[in-house]
Amino acid sequence: MSVDPLLQPFQLRGLTLRNRLMSTAHEPAYTDDGMPKTRYRLYHAEKARGGIALTMIGGSSVVAPDSPQAFGNILLYKDECVRWLKELADDVHDKGAAVMIQITHLGRRTSWSKDDWLPVIAPSHVREPAHRAFPKAMEDWDIARVIAAYADAAERVKAGGLDGVEFECYGHLIDQFWSPATNKRADEYGGSIDNRLRFGMAVFEAVRRRVGPDFLIGARLVCDEDWDRGLSRDEGMAIARRLTRSGLIDFLNVIKGHIDSDEALSRVIPGMGERSAPHLDFAGEVRAETRLPTFHAARIQDVATARHAIASGKLDMVGMTRAHMADPHIARKIAEGREAEIRPCVGMGYCIDSIYAGQAVCIHNPATGREATIPHLVPRSNGPKRKVVVVGAGPGGLEAARVAGERGHDVVVLEAAARPGGQIVLAAALKRRREIIGVVDWRVRECERLGVVFRFNAFAGADDVLGLDPDVVIIATGGAPNIEFLDSGGEFAVTSWDLLSGAARPGGEVIVYDDNGAHPGLSAAEYVADSGAKLEIVTPERMLAPDVGGTSYPPYFRAFSRADAKVSLNLRLESIARRGNRVVGVFYDEYGRRRVEKEADMIVVEHGAVPVDDLYFELKEGSVNRGEVDYDALIAGRPQTVRSNPGGGYRLFRIGDAVASRNIHAAVYDAIRLMKDI
C-alpha cells in the first residue's frame, strides 16, 4: 500500500520532518510586550499536537529597534526573547514537530511614529503606499549596524533551541535593495544586480558565520514581483540561482508578487473567489531551476491540492497556513482516515484582516488563538446526558448543536427555514463569496455524524420548545434587517437581504446605503455592480467599509471600478419617499450641516440586524438562570452556574444576532464558550 505523499517524511539536511505539511510564517499579533509568551506558544503547540511537521513562527520578527512592530511582531533585538523562544521550541518539539522563525528588518514597511520614534530606513527615499512612511536612505553605518543586528538576532534564535531561521525577502529591507522599484542608489549597493544583492548577501554571510554551518537557514523570497517597476521573473530567478550557488541557504520559500499596496498584497495572499494555488506552478519552476528544497503557500486550502503539490514534485513542503488556523489537526485527521472531518478554510481572509484590528482569529474556529480557554477538540461530558434544544440553524445555532453533540448530549435543532445557514446563505449568494457556505456545510456534516436531529420548516413557539422537555435551550434565532433607524419611508427601502435573496432585482439607478461598514453592505453593492445597474454607494463614514480588511476589500473595489460606481461619503440616510416611479433619499451632511436629496430607481439599505428575540423573552421566566450569563465565568472559560430562579425547568441562553448584530465569528464564539462545559 502506497504512503500518502503528504505523510512521507522529508530530510532537510540534519532535520527530519515527519510529513510534508507546514504552516508558513505569519504574525497573529499574539505577542505580549513583543515576546512569544503563553498564548503564542499554545497557538503553535496546538498545530504540533495536530501532527504538523513544521511550524514557522514570527512572521516578520524584527531584528532592530528602527524596525518597530507593524502588527505585534516578535522583538528579536531583545535578549529576553531567548527564554520565551526556548519554552515554545520545547513545547513544539515535545509534540513531534520542528519549529523555525522568520526574521527581518521591515525597512520602509512600518511606521516611524511607534515605539522609539526612530526614522524608517530603506535603500532609497521611496515611500511605501501601504504604511505611508517616508524613509531615510540608509547610510554606510546603517548598513553595518543592521547586518550586525541580523546576526545577533539569529544567535538568539539558536540559543532558544529553534531548528532554523528564514529571512523575509519580499517587501522588506533585503529585497527592497533587490528591487529596482525601491532601490535608486548610485553607490555600490545600487544599479547592477550584483550591487543590489550586496546587502542581502552580507546579511546571509554574517548570520552563517554567527550560527555555524549546521544551523538551518532559508529565505522566503520573491522570485517575480509581477510588476513593471519591480523584479522581473528573469531577475528573480537569477537571484534564486545565486543564493543557491552561494551555499548559504538551505531552502527557499517562494513568493510571487509585491505587497506595497493592499491591492498588490491581495494577489500575493489571494482570498475568497480567487483560483486555488495560483502560484504553485511558478514555485515548481523555481524548484526545478534551483534544485533547493522548496516551500510555498498561497491559497492551498484543501488536502487534495496540497497532495498534488507534493506528488507532482512542485514542492518539498506545502504550506497550509490559513487552513491550519481553521483546523490545526489536519495531519492527524489525514493519518487517521478522517479527512472528511477537517474544518475547511473558506478563504474569507478574516484571519489576516483581524491582525490589523488587534489579533488574528479564524472566522469559524473560535479556538484558534484561545487555546488556553477554548478547546479545539471538545471533550465528552462526564456528567449526565442532557436534552439540548437549539432554535435556529445559522452559524451560531449549528456550532451550539455541534458542541453539544460532541459533549454526548441529545440535541434537536428547530429551524424555521427549509435549509440551514441563516445569513450565510445570503452571503453565499454573491458568486465570488460562495465558498463561505463551507462554514455551514461542515457543521451540518459534523452534526449528522454526532446524531443531532434537525427539524426544518419548524417555526418554533414556546410550546414547541417546552414540548421537547429540554434541559438546555439555546436561542439562535438571529436577526431581521434593521430599517428602524429611518425617520420615515421604511416601506420604500430594499434591504440587502431582499437583494441577495433574489426577492428584489436591481435595475436602472441603484443607491446602496451602507451604515454597517462590513461585508454585508459591500456584498450588496457588488451584487448590484455585477447586475449591470448603475451603482452609487453612500455611507455616513469618512471611508468606505472600515471593518473590511486590507486583503478583503480589493476584490470589491475591482467590481466597483468595472461598474464605474460612484461613492459618496459622510452622508447619513434619514428618510425615503416615493417620487413617481422612483424613490428619493434624504441624507444629512453633518459637516456641511445640510440635507442632500438623491433620487434612484432603488435604495438598498444595510444597517445591521435587529434581534429576533420574542421566543427568548417568552421562555425567560421559566428558566433556571432567567437567561443570565455570568460574564466573568464566560471570559475566564469557566462553566455557567447562575441559578437565579431555582424553580425553573431549564437553562436558557441566546447567542449571535439574537443578542445583537455582529458577525459569524461572534456567533460561533458565543456558542462554544457557553456549550463546552454543559
Image (tube, rainbow, N blue to C red):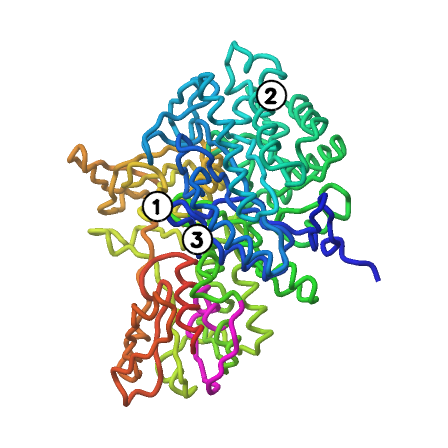
- Between marks 1 and 3 in the image, the one whose residue lies nearer the viewer: 3
Residue 495 is marked as none
Marks 2/1: CA distance?
A: 44 Å
Marks 2/3: CA distance?
A: 35 Å
- Tell me where residue 632 appears, x and y as whole percent: 30, 68
Mark 2 closeness class: few <14, some 14–19, many ≥20 residues within 10 Å: many
Residue type at numbered disc 2: Leu
Residue type at numbered disc 3: Lys
Q: Residue at x 47, y 62 (%)?
A: 371
User: Is residue 96 visible in the rendered structure shown here?
Assistant: yes
Q: Secondary structure at mark 1?
A: loop
First in residue order: circle 1 vs circle 3: 3
Residue 517 is marked as 1
- Between marks 2 and 1 in the image, the one whose residue lies nearer the viewer: 2
First in residue order: circle 2 vs circle 3: 3
Q: Does the segment drawn in magenta span residue 458? A: no
Q: Nearer the viewer, residue 464 or 385?
A: 385
Q: Nearer the viewer, residue 101 or 349?
A: 101
Residue 197 is marked as 2
Mark 1 closeness class: few <14, some 14–19, many ≥20 residues within 10 Å: many
Quarter of the image where the C terminus is located = bottom left
Residue type at numbered disc 1: Gly
- Tell me where residue 598 appears, x and y as whole percent: 28, 37
> Residue lying farthest top?
186
First in residue order: circle 2 vs circle 1: 2
Residue range corresponding to the magenta coloring: 377-401
Q: Is residue 467 above or below residue 138?
A: below
From the viewer's perspective, tell me whether residue 75 is left or right of residue 2.
left
Q: Secondary structure at mark 2?
A: helix
Q: Which residue is mark 3?
A: 37
Marks 1/3: CA distance?
A: 34 Å
Q: Does the segment drawn in magenta span residue 380? A: yes
